[in-house]
Image (tube, rainbow, N blue to C red):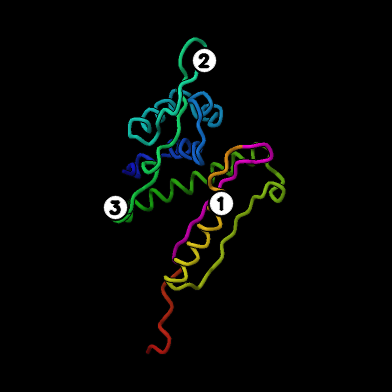
């Protein structure tokens, strides 16, 4: 069962979920290293909230300085927002959730630039918006083709020569529907 949008779409919890996406398994200390700007006590509280909701599971325990260090992984299903949540949400809920996602993107991009990310072309960074005239069927076909194109690489694990890259897609209407042909 998917977790509630308000649980997942908190800025810090969303970053924890993103850090573990793609089958990654990280300890709280490793997550703290990746989210170095988040105070440790706050990060641990968010990890506990996600684990308590069933979004994270302890994948293994490693010995560390005489104690067991928990290694977390995402649980399939709960780390997503379900269709019922989306259908039952009010417009202000959607706006708040969307703003959280967009703010997270801005934060991620700002961290990249502040860390010295200056060669956007070499790093494969890109952003653009295109207008597409599509019927509902054409949009569904495009989404299917995009999913099929991504499927072979979704299971890739970290390896030499690989770099973690985040792909974000946002699809929304660009205005009112075009008038029907021949309508009057």
From the top left corner, tell me how far across and down residue 48 is, in percent: 38, 27
Q: Which residue is mark 2?
A: 64
Q: Earlier in the sequence, mark 2 or mark 1?
A: 2
Badge 3 marks a residue whose secondary structure is: helix
Residue 116 among magenta residues: no
Crowd around label 1: few <14 · some 14–19 · many ≥20 (10 Å): few
123 w.r.t. 149: above or below: above
Q: Earlier in the sequence, mark 3 or mark 1?
A: 3
Which mark identifies residue 1?
Answer: none
From the top left corner, tell me how far across and down residue 101 is, in percent: 46, 47
Q: Which residue is mark 3?
A: 84
Which residue is found at the position 43% from the left and 25% from the top?
44
| Magenta stretch in the rendered image | 159-173
Q: Quadrant of the N terminus?
A: top left
Whole-Å distance between the Cαs marked 3 and 1? 29 Å
130 w.r.t. 86: above or below: below
Report if the CB atoms under discs 3 and 1 are less than 8 Å apart.
no
From the top left corner, tell me how far across and down residue 129 is, in percent: 56, 62
Badge 2 marks a residue whose secondary structure is: strand
Q: Which residue is mark 1?
A: 152
Residue 165 among magenta residues: yes
- Between residue 67 and residue 49, name the one nearer to us: 67
Q: Earlier in the sequence, mark 3 or mark 2?
A: 2
């Amino acid at each position: 069962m998917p977790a509630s949008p308000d649980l997942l779409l908190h800025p810090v919890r969303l970053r924890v979920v993103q850090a573990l996406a793609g089958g990654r398994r990280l300890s709280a200390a490793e997550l703290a290293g990746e989210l170095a700007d988040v105070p440790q006590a706050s990060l641990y509280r968010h990890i506990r909230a996600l684990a308590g909701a069933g979004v994270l599971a302890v994948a293994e325990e490693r010995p560390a300085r005489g104690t067991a260090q928990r290694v977390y992984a995402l649980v399939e299903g709960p780390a997503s927002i379900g269709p019922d949540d989306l259908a039952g949400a009010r417009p202000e809920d959607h706006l708040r959730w969307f703003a959280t996602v967009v703010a997270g993107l801005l934060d991620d991009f700002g961290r990249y630039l502040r860390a010295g990310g200056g060669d956007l072309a070499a790093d494969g960074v890109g952003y653009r918006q295109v207008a597409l005239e599509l019927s509902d069927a054409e949009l569904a076909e495009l989404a299917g083709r995009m999913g099929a194109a991504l499927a072979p690489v979704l299971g890739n694990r970290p390896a030499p020569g690989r770099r973690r890259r985040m792909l974000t897609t946002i699809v929304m209407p660009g205005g009112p529907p075009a008038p029907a042909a021949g309508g009057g």
